[in-house]
Amino acid sequence: MAHGVITRRYTSVTIKDGAGTPLTRAVGPGPGDFKFSTLENGNYAAIKVLDRGQFYELVPGDDNEIKVSGSIYVDGDQTGTSVVDAVLKTGDWASATTTDPGGVVWAFTLVLTEVYSGVTNVYTLAKCRGIASWEESDAGNKLSFDVTCYGGCTRT
């Protein structure tokens, strides 16, 4: 069994739309600070049921929303094919196909891939919406992203 600590150096993040041959955009360059949370068995919350104030059982609750955050450096022209265009559905992404089943609200797929020492881990986060923020810095201006994914996470 191959092993070794996988770091940001071996991780990539990609945004995809819902087309049969999807539009894709690699996220970066950046400091390697993407993170996500709320992975839970079955992608739903467990609700505690009490019997006269004492624990009785757990029952399935609502689907979880997976929260993703991270940042990239502002690199080159930010119009047309940029990560911001993918998140906001502008530029070359204006005619992108949503992943939302209702077909009206813009949503995308976020894929985080780790490849190291013969091991590949892929996290696919579905039906995501994002908010972009801009920040200037001596080390390089950054775009920060807060993303909410409504369709769960599959790992392969």
Image (spheres, helix red, strand yellow):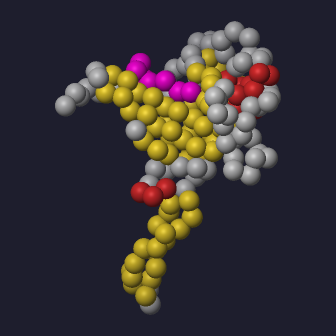
Q: Residue furthest top?
A: 76
Q: Quadrant of residue 148?
A: top right
In the rendered view, tell whether residue 77 sits above or below residue 3. Answer: above
Q: Is residue 104 left or right of residue 99?
A: right
Q: Position of residue 34 (x, y in %)?
A: 52, 31
Tell which of 78 and 19 is nearer to you.
19
Tell which of 82 and 154 is nearer to you.
154
Q: Report the number of discs.
A: 0
The residue shown at (50%, 63%) is 45
The residue shown at (46%, 50%) is 39
Q: Position of residue 37 (x, y in %)?
A: 49, 45
Q: Position of residue 146 (x, y in %)?
A: 63, 38
Tell which of 78 and 104 is nearer to you.
104
* Residue 10 highlighted magenta (yes or no): yes
| Stretch in magenta | 8-14
Image quarter in which the N terminus is found: top left
In the rendered view, tell whether residue 93 sits above or below residue 124. Answer: above
Q: Residue furthest front?
A: 20
Q: Residue furthest left?
A: 1
Q: Is residue 113 left or right of residue 2?
A: right
Q: Residue furthest bottom?
A: 52
* Residue 12 highlighted magenta (yes or no): yes
The residue shown at (40%, 38%) is 156
The residue shown at (45%, 58%) is 42
Mark yes or no: residue 51 visible.
Answer: yes
Mark yes or no: residue 143 visible.
Answer: no
Q: Position of residue 43 (x, y in %)?
A: 49, 56
Q: Quadrant of residue 41?
A: bottom left
